[in-house]
Image (cartoon, rainbow, N blue to C red):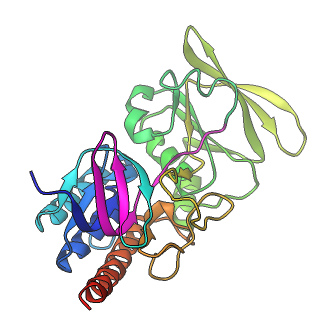
C-alpha cells in the first residue's frame, strides 16, 4: 500500500470533473489521490445518450465515464474507494479525514463532489420512492414499458428524461410550472415533435398517490387558476435539477444563495489551495464538457500552487 502521509493534490469526487483533474495533475507530476465513495463516473453514468461531448456523436454515460476512468488510470491515478468526511484547511497543509481514523494531508485539495437530485418535497414523494417515484429514467424506465408516466421539470434534465421514456412508455406527460421550457432548443424541438409526449403548462405536482403500494395517480394544480385535478399515472420521474454536495466545503468558503461554491477563473475558492469544480461550483452552464474543463483548470492551477509552495519551503 502506498504511503499516504502526504500528497501534493487530493481530489474528492470521481465524476468527469474529478477524473479530468486527476489526468492533468498527474501530467504535471503531482503526487495525487482521488477519493470516491461510490463508483467513479458520477451522475454521468445515469445518462442513456450523450450527443454533445466533443469527439463522440453518440455514447451512453456509463461508457463515457469508463473512458474517463481508463484514461486517468493510464497515468496510474491512485483511487481510494472511501468516503471523505471532513476537510480542514491549514496554513501549511490541508487535512482530509476519511471514514475511519485515517487522515490524508496535502498542499492542495480539489473538491469535485457534484450534487444530488433535487426533491419536490410533496406528499407521496418519499413514501413511494422505488414504488413508482424515480429520479432516473435510464435506471428505472424499463419497469414502465407501455405505461403512463409523468415527468416533472422544464430544463435539459427533464426533457431528456421525457424523450428517453417516450421510447418505452405508452404516454408521457411533462409537467412544467411555467409557460416556457428552459431546455436547449434542440431538445425542445425533439420534445414537441414526439407524439407520445404531452406538455402540461403552468402546472405543478401537488401530491403523488398510490394504490396497493404502487403509484397510481398524481394531483396536479394549475399555477394560474389554482384548479386541481387528478391524473392517472403509474410512474413519476422528477427532473428538477440538483443540489450541490457541499457538506465538505469548509466554513468560511464563499458560496452563493443556492449553496454553490464561488471561485475565481482558476476554480480556486477564497481559501488558498482549495479548489471547487464541476457541479459544485457556481457557473453559467452545467455540462459534462464544462466539468471536464473545470478539472483541467483546477489541476493546472493546483500544480502551480504546489510548485510555489515547494519553492517557498526550500528557501
Q: Is residue 274 visible?
A: yes
Q: Position of residue 172 (x, y in %)?
A: 56, 37
Closer to the camera in the image, 87 or 267: 87
Q: Determine the main secondary structure of the stretch shown in magenta.
A: strand
Residue ranking furthest to the front = 315
Residue at (19%, 70%) from the top-left corner? 31
Q: In the image, is 168 to the left or to the right of 79?
A: right
Q: Position of residue 298 (x, y in %)?
A: 38, 75
Closer to the camera in the image, 171 or 123: 123
Residue at (47%, 33%) from the top-left corner? 169
100 falls in the magenta region = yes
Q: Position of residue 68 (x, y in %)?
A: 23, 62
What segment is highlighted magenta in the picture? Answer: 93-120
Say if 166 sits above or below 31 in the image: above
Say if 191 sits above or below 139 in the image: below
147 falls in the magenta region = no
Say if 185 sits above or below 195 in the image: below
Residue at (36%, 50%) from the top-left corner? 97
Q: Is residue 290 visible?
A: no
Amino acid at each position: 500500500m502506498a504511503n499516504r502521509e502526504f500528497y501534493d493534490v487530493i481530489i474528492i469526487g470521481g465524476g468527469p470533473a474529478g477524473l479530468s483533474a486527476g489526468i492533468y495533475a498527474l501530467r504535471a507530476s503531482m503526487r495525487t489521490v482521488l477519493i470516491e465513495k461510490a463508483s467513479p463516473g458520477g451522475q454521468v453514468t445515469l445518462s442513456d445518450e450523450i450527443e454533445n461531448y466533443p469527439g463522440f456523436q453518440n455514447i451512453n454515460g456509463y461508457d463515457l465515464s469508463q473512458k474517463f476512468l481508463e484514461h486517468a488510470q493510464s497515468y496510474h491515478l491512485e483511487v481510494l474507494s472511501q468516503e471523505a468526511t471532513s476537510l480542514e484547511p491549514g496554513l501549511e497543509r490541508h487535512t482530509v479525514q476519511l471514514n475511519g481514523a485515517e487522515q490524508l494531508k496535502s498542499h492542495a485539495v480539489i473538491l469535485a463532489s457534484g450534487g444530488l437530485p433535487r426533491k419536490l418535497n410533496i406528499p407521496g414523494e418519499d413514501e413511494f420512492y422505488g414504488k413508482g417515484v424515480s429520479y432516473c429514467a435510464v435506471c428505472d424506465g424499463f419497469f414502465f414499458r407501455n405505461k403512463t408516466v409523468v415527468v416533472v421539470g422544464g430544463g435539459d434534465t427533464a426533457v431528456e428524461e421525457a424523450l428517453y421514456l417516450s421510447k418505452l412508455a405508452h404516454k408521457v406527460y411533462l409537467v412544467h410550472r411555467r409557460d416556457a421550457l428552459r431546455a436547449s432548443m434542440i431538445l425542445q424541438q425533439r420534445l414537441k415533435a414526439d407524439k407520445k409526449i404531452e406538455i402540461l403548462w403552468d402546472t405543478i405536482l401537488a401530491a403523488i398517490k398510490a394504490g396497493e403500494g404502487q403509484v397510481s395517480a398524481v394531483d396536479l394544480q394549475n399555477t394560474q387558476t389554482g384548479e386541481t385535478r387528478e391524473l392517472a399515472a403509474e410512474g413519476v420521474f422528477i427532473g428538477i435539477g440538483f443540489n450541490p454536495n457541499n457538506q465538505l466545503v469548509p466554513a468560511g468558503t464563499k458560496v452563493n444563495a443556492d449553496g454553490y461554491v464561488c471561485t475565481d477563473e482558476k476554480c480556486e475558492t477564497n481559501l488558498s489551495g482549495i479548489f471547487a469544480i464541476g457541479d459544485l461550483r457556481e457557473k453559467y452552464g452545467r455540462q459534462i464538457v464544462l466539468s471536464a474543463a473545470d478539472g483541467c483548470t483546477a489541476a493546472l492551477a493546483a500544480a502551480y500552487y504546489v510548485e510555489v509552495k515547494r519553492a517557498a519551503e526550500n528557501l
